[in-house]
Image (cartoon, coloured by chain):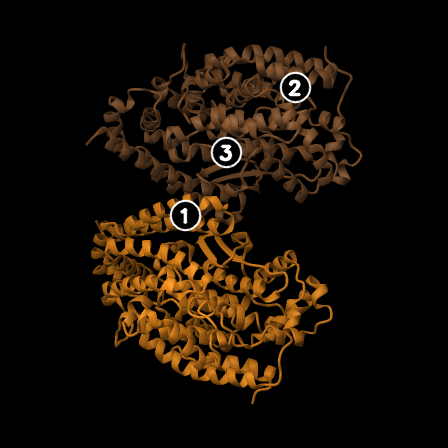
Chain colours: A orange, B brown
Amino acid sequence: MSARDTYTQLVNHLRKTATLASCSAVLGWDEQTYMPPEGAEFRSEQTSLLAGMIHDLATDPRVGDWLGELRGSALSADPLTPEAVNIREAARDFDRQTRLPKRLVEEQAGVATRAQQAWIEARKQNTFATFLPWLEQTVALKREEAACLADLVTGPGPHEPYDALLDQFEPGMTAADVTRLFTPLRESLVTLIREIRDSSRKPDQEILERIYPIPAQREFAMQAARQVGFRFEAGRLDETAHPFCSGFGPGDTRLTTRYDDHHFPGAFFGTLHEAGHGLYEQNLNREAFGLGMGSAVSLGIHESQSRLWENFVGRSEAFWTHFFPKARAAFPAALSDASLDEFYFAINSVQPSYIRVEADEATYNLHILLRFEIERPLVAGDLAPKDVPGVWNETFRRYFDMTPPDDTLGCLQDIHWSFGGIGYFPTYTLGNMNAAQLYNAAQSELGPLAPMFAAGEFAPLKNWLVENIHRRGKQFSAPQLIQQVTGQSLSHVALVDHLRAKYQPLYGLK
Amino acid sequence: MSARDTYTQLVNHLRKTATLASCSAVLGWDEQTYMPPEGAEFRSEQTSLLAGMIHDLATDPRVGDWLGELRGSALSADPLTPEAVNIREAARDFDRQTRLPKRLVEEQAGVATRAQQAWIEARKQNTFATFLPWLEQTVALKREEAACLADLVTGPGPHEPYDALLDQFEPGMTAADVTRLFTPLRESLVTLIREIRDSSRKPDQEILERIYPIPAQREFAMQAARQVGFRFEAGRLDETAHPFCSGFGPGDTRLTTRYDDHHFPGAFFGTLHEAGHGLYEQNLNREAFGLGMGSAVSLGIHESQSRLWENFVGRSEAFWTHFFPKARAAFPAALSDASLDEFYFAINSVQPSYIRVEADEATYNLHILLRFEIERPLVAGDLAPKDVPGVWNETFRRYFDMTPPDDTLGCLQDIHWSFGGIGYFPTYTLGNMNAAQLYNAAQSELGPLAPMFAAGEFAPLKNWLVENIHRRGKQFSAPQLIQQVTGQSLSHVALVDHLRAKYQPLYGLK
């Protein structure tokens, strides 16, 4: 059989695997949106069955045989051709999936289910002790996982156990890279946030807490999502307790949000955020569905798309120059006596708070940095799980000049560790840094973006992202892609500059 | 390995197969309810993949081995034990699935897809000639299918090709049975409908065509469905172009309906109808999911549950004695000046019409009888597809004293033949006959039902159906079940008596 025939077999198998995974995505979406409560037990049987079948397909020994043949073939010769990229990424997935012992995977799944229940209980009762044994088990299993995957890490050294976990979300990046990026960011942010705190100017948040009827919020958020380029012919917006974006596959991308009729920003910026993810999903190369060339680069790049539309576009003055009159028409009771300036300042309020998911654009990153500083030694074995609350509170105080009054407002607030999502948090702030650098690169190529936004024109930026990010799939790693598209390796500078440029006039900083 | 171990393996495999089929049901529901239009193409890839995997599981040769061992074992000795029933039904499915050549199944799937497109076009353009070649191919393939399955037919002879098709929907019944039932029904109905036509009393339908706001319709229909026993903790009601009920599995049954804000009965009786199906699904034995003991007996029995709640309960005077004041409160603009008597007569109007799905409770059955009279010789080879329009129109005239003005209002109106659903239509009228006989049996056991309905009490009837029908799964065939529960074999008498008893006072018949 020729290498080309082998490649075709591999591609068909990968598409089949991805199509089955997409069936599971539909069930996952339904579970969050419309499933009645008593359907939960059977739904977990359905999704377990699919997970097992997907795993069987992904680890089919034939895939190993095909890849063995293809890695040395002419199809892999030029590493940037679609074929070479698809082979490389298939090998990456196959290696990772086959490297983990079945016993470990099953144990992790079992612990994750019970750890999440314990976490829910612990957070409700504010008792870290309830969660501690599960955190210990989770960390131990993740350390074992990291050991299994250590030699698959591709980013620069010196290597440490955390790298193998991070690599699954942000291929090509290591803990050392993240530390190099986060250390100067932290210093700049702490300073900026203190300056803002000490400013005598404060926005009036009350504007955002008037009555915003939910049907009008939905309509208005959809209008904005549509205008920035999300196509509802190939997508939807529904309501869930925890907003997300799920790209089922070609032609079908689902966004969700949640509404509070006394709080405008939640659903609106949440929808723009998910629409940013959705634009990425909608503009992936559909011919390459299930293959490296048709997949998102990394979580940090995916998050850059959501943050870019949510914050760099959606919280800009120019955006609201266009949308504020529409907002006034949509919410006459709330906004008829408000000015654009007041509104713009209110949606850009900076205010240290305990809960990450409620944090503003500036303080948000400190929440992430704190988590990274805890996860890293936890995985290295340098921090005992029992010491997490103390370290959390101490670090929080250093960053925010505040101490969480309890663990529910501290180290118990996030679900991630309970499901084993260690190594995931950094991608949120990498997303913000990527977004800042991409925004600048787009602007230097397209000219000033603000006048376009003020005129309601978002297609130039969207098309630039489609061309430079979405259509490239995994041809490059995230660090390579950023270098290539922005002309520089990733750094904290663009993000800090963006934040300072925005807050200086608002808060009257020096 | 003991027979018990073999049985356990079989059961696990059947559950797995049914669970995978239930995943496909979720995707099917989403396709009809919420999927964006551009998702259609990829959705068909997802469902084809699942269909292939389900077929592979269902025809796994190990199933044949297990069944071979179990058919002669002690577990099959007493045919009414759960084990024996589950083995028998598994064998029935396996035999049918493995009897059909893969080539035939694939050809049928391909023809069905294209035949449906041709049918849509033919119906729109009113050109039977467009559909004719597809009807010819479909009939030829169904005849081939019938030949493959002929020796699996269990009902009484003399046998003919149609039996093998009917047997898939209504196991244990043959064309001869259906003819025996339908012939006297037809004579009684034709007479009854002529008497009604000649009556000088006519209901005022205008009451039902006032403004019924859709949110209130939804609320009111859900209230009624809940009150007859459908549990929304384990189900939902959504909106689709073509209403249906889909029981995904334990704890999750989805109903759909469609609304017209100028037509009350469509959504309301449609919801009650689907809720009747839903009650069956919700009360199947969940421990026996995927097995004969946890499955519905037949389409004719399933339909009896929907028709019973829609017509025997929902269109009764007692039902509206309870619900009419609530309807008035829900739709004050439409009903404040209407009386219960006017309303009750309006929802029981009998009026011959061309379209089956819009037909009333009495004329509906003649639409079904007509289709059976065409399908049967079509499958036998005694009627050429090209002659269908002529025979349709001639038969319609005999039954209704009207001739369809064109084929869109005649033989092109239903989707069934285009997807190969030949042998399906009789189950609708069998459902009505079953419902009538079951209703009488319930009443002779529970006492008069009307006073209960008038007091808003539906639990006695629901519980009687759960115990006598839902919980029995496929322990008995449909004819056996009806004999056992009602003490008589199925006949037209109870249905005709019910219709005459209802219409006599309304229309002042003799």
The label number, if any, that marks residue A23 in the structure image: 1
Residue toward you, B277 or A230: B277
From the viewer's perspective, is residue B121 above or below residue A319? above
Evaluate whether residue B469 shows in this view. no
Badge 1: chain ID: A
Horizontal side, residue B450 vs residue A491: left or right? right
The answer to which image quadrant residue A146 occupies is bottom left
From the viewer's perspective, is residue A282 above or below residue B290? below
The label number, if any, that marks residue B76 in the structure image: none
Q: CA distance from mark 3 to mark 1?
A: 25 Å
Name which residue type carries label 3.
Gln
Name which residue type carries label 1.
Cys
Residue where numbered disc 3 is placed: B116
Q: Secondary structure at mark 1?
A: helix
Label tally: 3
| Residue occupying the far right of the picture | B337
From the viewer's perspective, is residue A291 above or below residue B453? below
Residue toward you, B421 or B430: B430
The label number, if any, that marks residue B403 in the structure image: 2
Task: Tell me residue B383's x, y (percent).
Answer: 49, 16
Task: Tell me residue B286's x, y (percent).
Answer: 41, 35
Residue displayed at 41% across by 14% down: B160
Q: Secondary structure at mark 2?
A: loop
